[in-house]
Image (tube, grey):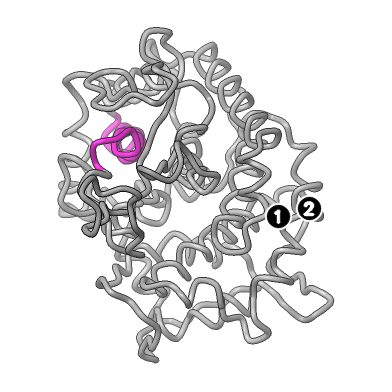
C-alpha cells in the first residue's frame, strides 16, 4: 500500500532477480556490493562531517563544484578555476560523496534482499533511509542552497541541483522495498513528506528557477527530478504541466534535427554527457507514458524528437560507428544500460540485436543507476559498478 512505481515495473524487477539467481557470478558481485553496507555506522549527513555549510548547520547539504581547482597563479589559490571533466581531489570531502554512497548502497540492499529473500538486507535499507531523511539527529534538510560552491566565487550554485539526480533511482528502488520493522508505512509517508518539501524548494527557490532555465543536461535533469518526485510523493497533477510547459519546449530547443545533442557534444566528456542527458529524457518519457503522454513518439513543431536522439546514439553503443567527439576518460558501456532499458520498454523503440544481447548481460544495471560508472567518480568501498 502507498507504493507507486516510478520507472521500473515490478515485472522488470522480478525478471532481473531471476537473471541474477541464474548467474552465480552476478549474484556474488551483488552480494559483495550489498554486503559492504549491511553493518556499521549509518550513512548520514552529520556524522564525520569535514566541512560545514556557511549556515553552520550540519544538516545543510554542502558540496564542492567537481571540476574546479585552486588557481596556481594566486598565492591563496583564489578564485578557483575550472577544468571541465577533471574532478578536483577535494570534491570527495563533501556531502556529495555521502549522498552517492547512500544512493549506491540502498538500491543494492533492496535488490539483494529480494534476490536472496534476506530480511537483514531489507531492514538495513530501511535503517539507512531513516538516517538520511527522517531521524531528527541525522536527517538532511530538504534543500540544496549550498551545493557545488566554488571557493572565491560563490557559496552555492543553481547547477548544484544536479547533485540529487541519483535520488530518482534510490526512490524508484524504495517502491520495491517490502515493509519491515525498520521500514514501515509510516516511514514511507515520512519520506514522501521530505520529497514533497524538497520538490517545493526546487519549484520555488531562485536556484530552482535558474536550473530549470538551463539549456543543457542540467535543465533536462531538473525536469526529470520534478516529475519523478511528483510521482513518488503523489503530486501527479504537476506532471502534465511540467511536460507541456518545460520538457516539450526543451526538446524543441535542445536537440538538433538529426537527434544530436549540441550542448553535450561541446563537453570534454561528450559521450558521457550525451548518455547522461539521454537517461534524463528516458526517465521523463517513462513518467510521461504513465500519465498518458507518449513522449517518445512526440515531435516538436520544428521536427525535433526523443526518438531521433535515441537513434542518433545507437550506432555508437552498438560499436558500429566510432565516437568522434572529445572524451577525455574511457566510456563505460554499463552507464548506457539503464537509458536503453527504459527506451526499449516502449514498443516503438527497437534496438539492434547486438545491443539487446548486451543489455541482458548486465542484470542489475537495467534497474539501478550508478553515477560512479557514468562519471568515473569513486564511491567509497567500491572499485566498480
Q: Position of residue 344 (x, y in %)?
A: 54, 67
Quarter residue 58 falls in: top left
Residue 173 falls left or right of residue 312: left
The residue sitting at the right extreme is 301
Residue hosting label 1: 289
Classified by dominant secondary structure, the portion drawn in magenta counts as helix
Q: Is residue 26 magenta?
A: no
> Which residue is nearer to you in this view: 7 or 216?
216
> Camera-side residue: 358 or 78?
78
Tell whether label 2 touches label 1 (CB within 8 Å). Answer: yes
Residue 370 at x, y percent in the picture = 34, 51
For numbered disc 1, what is the local secondary structure? helix
**Range of magenta residues:** 92-117
Give the quarter of the figure containing the N terminus: top right
Name the residue rendered at 54%, 61% in the picture: 217
- Residue 151 left/right relative to 309: left
- Judging by the rendered image, the residue that carries numbered circle 2 is 292
Q: How crowded is mark 1: few (under 14 residues within 10 Å), some or many (20 or more)?
A: few
Residue 103 higher or lower than 258, as above or below: above
Q: Tell which of 175 and 62 is nearer to you.
A: 62
| Relative to 74, residue 148 above or below | above
Amino acid at each position: 500500500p502507498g507504493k507507486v512505481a516510478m520507472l521500473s515495473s515490478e515485472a522488470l524487477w522480478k525478471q532481473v532477480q531471476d537473471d541474477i539467481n541464474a548467474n552465480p557470478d552476478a549474484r556474488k558481485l551483488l552480494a559483495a556490493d550489498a554486503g559492504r553496507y549491511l553493518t556499521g555506522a549509518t550513512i548520514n549527513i552529520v556524522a564525520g562531517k569535514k566541512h560545514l555549510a556557511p549556515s553552520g548547520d550540519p544538516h545543510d547539504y554542502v558540496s564542492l563544484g567537481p571540476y574546479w581547482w585552486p588557481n596556481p597563479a594566486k598565492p591563496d589559490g583564489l578564485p578557483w578555476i575550472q577544468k571541465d571533466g577533471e574532478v578536483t581531489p577535494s570534491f570527495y570531502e563533501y556531502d556529495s560523496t555521502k549522498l552517492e554512497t547512500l544512493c549506491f548502497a540502498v538500491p543494492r540492499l533492496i535488490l539483494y534482499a529480494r534476490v536472496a529473500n534476506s530480511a537483514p538486507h531489507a531492514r538495513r535499507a530501511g535503517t539507512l533511509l531513516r538516517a538520511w531523511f527522517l531521524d531528527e539527529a541525522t536527517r538532511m534538510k530538504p534543500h540544496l542552497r549550498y551545493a557545488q560552491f566554488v571557493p572565491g566565487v560563490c557559496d552555492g550554485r543553481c547547477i548544484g541541483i544536479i547533485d540529487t539526480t541519483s535520488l530518482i533511482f534510490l526512490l524508484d528502488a524504495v517502491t520495491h522495498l517490502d515493509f519491515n520493522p525498520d521500514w514501515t508505512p509510516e516511514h514511507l509517508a515520512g519520506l514522501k513528506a521530505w520529497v514533497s518539501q524538497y520538490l517545493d524548494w526546487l519549484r520555488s527557490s531562485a536556484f530552482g528557477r535558474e536550473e530549470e532555465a538551463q539549456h543543457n543536461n542540467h535543465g533536462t535533469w531538473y525536469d526529470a527530478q520534478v516529475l519523478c518526485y511528483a510521482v513518488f510523493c503523489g503530486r501527479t497533477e504537476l506532471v502534465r504541466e511540467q511536460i507541456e510547459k518545460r520538457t516539450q519546449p526543451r526538446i524543441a530547443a535542445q536537440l538538433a534535427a538529426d537527434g544530436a545533442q549540441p550542448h553535450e557534444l561541446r563537453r570534454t566528456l561528450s559521450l558521457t554527457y550525451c548518455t547522461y542527458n539521454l537517461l534524463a529524457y528516458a526517465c521523463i518519457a517513462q513518467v510521461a507514458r504513465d500519465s498518458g503522454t507518449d513522449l517518445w513518439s512526440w515531435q516538436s513543431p520544428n521536427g525535433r524528437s526523443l526518438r531521433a536522439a535515441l537513434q542518433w546514439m545507437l550506432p555508437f553503443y552498438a560499436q558500429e560507428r566510432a565516437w568522434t567527439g572529445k572524451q577525455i576518460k574511457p566510456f563505460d558501456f554499463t552507464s548506457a544500460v539503464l537509458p536503453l532499458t527504459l527506451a526499449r520498454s516502449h514498443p516503438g523503440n527497437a534496438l539492434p540485436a547486438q545491443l539487446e544481447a548486451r543489455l541482458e548481460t548486465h542484470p542489475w544495471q537495467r534497474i539501478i543507476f550508478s553515477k560512479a560508472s557514468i562519471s568515473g567518480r569513486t564511491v567509497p568501498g567500491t572499485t566498480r559498478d
